[in-house]
């Protein structure tokens, strides 16, 4: 992953001493993004043969979401 995307993915682990439910940092942001992507039916399965097409099919709904947020002035990060 580092070689292709120039980034390092780090899993967010549950604290060892935690009992019960624990809120993990950044988890809500990731789950919200996947929920936005799942609104588009085309993401149910990956039908693209070319990886660049798959990437483009992710950019399209995210651009739409960003435009909606700009229109409604509700950008939240």
Image (cartoon, rainbow, N blue to C red):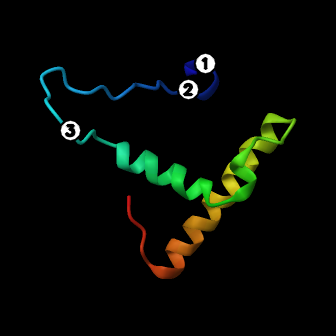
Q: Nearer the viewer, residue 22 or 49?
A: 22
Residue contact between numbered discs 2 and 1, judged by CB atoms under 8 Å: yes
Does residue 52 appear to the left or right of 61 in the view shown? Answer: right
Q: Position of residue 5 (x, y in %)?
A: 60, 28
* Nearer the camera: disc 3 or disc 1: 3
Mark 1 element type: helix
Disc 3 crowd rating (10 Å Cα; few below 14, some 14-19, many 20+) is: few
Residue contact between numbered discs 2 and 3, judged by CB atoms under 8 Å: no
Q: Position of residue 16 (x, y in %)?
A: 18, 20
Seen in the picture, residue 59 relative to 75 is either above or below; the reply is: above
Name the residue tied to disc 1: 3
Name the residue tied to disc 3: 22
Determine which of the numbered discs, if any, sits on residue 6 in the image.
2
Does residue 32 appear to the left or right of 18 in the view shown? Answer: right
Q: Which residue in the rendered view is the most extreme toward the right?
A: 49
Seen in the picture, residue 39 relative to 27 is either above or below; the reply is: below
Q: CA distance from mark 2 to mark 1?
A: 6 Å
**Residue at figure coordinates x 56%, y 74% from the top left:** 68
Q: Nearer the viewer, residue 60 or 4?
A: 60
Q: Position of residue 35 (x, y in %)?
A: 52, 54
**Residue at figure coordinates x 36%, y 43% from the top left:** 27
Disc 1 crowd rating (10 Å Cα; few below 14, some 14-19, many 20+) is: few
Determine which of the numbered discs, if any, sits on residue 70 in the image.
none
Q: Quadrant of the C terminus?
A: bottom left
Q: Which residue in the rendered view is the most extreme toward the front?
A: 20
Q: CA distance from mark 2 to mark 3?
A: 31 Å
Q: Position of residue 30 (x, y in %)?
A: 44, 45
Q: Which residue in the rendered view is the most extreme toward the bottom?
A: 72
Which of the marked residues, 3 or 1, is nearer the chain's N terminus?
Answer: 1
Q: CA distance from mark 3 to mark 1?
A: 33 Å
Which of the marked residues, 2 or 3, is nearer the chain's N terminus?
Answer: 2
């Amino acid at each position: 992953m580092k070689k292709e995307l120039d980034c390092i993915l780090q899993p967010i682990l549950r604290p060892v001493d935690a009992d019960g439910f624990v809120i993990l940092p950044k988890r809500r942001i990731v789950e919200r993004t996947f929920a936005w992507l799942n609104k588009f039916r085309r993401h149910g399965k990956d039908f693209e043969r070319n990886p660049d097409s798959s990437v483009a099919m992710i950019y399209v709904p995210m651009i739409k979401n960003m435009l909606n947020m700009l229109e409604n002035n509700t950008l939240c990060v």
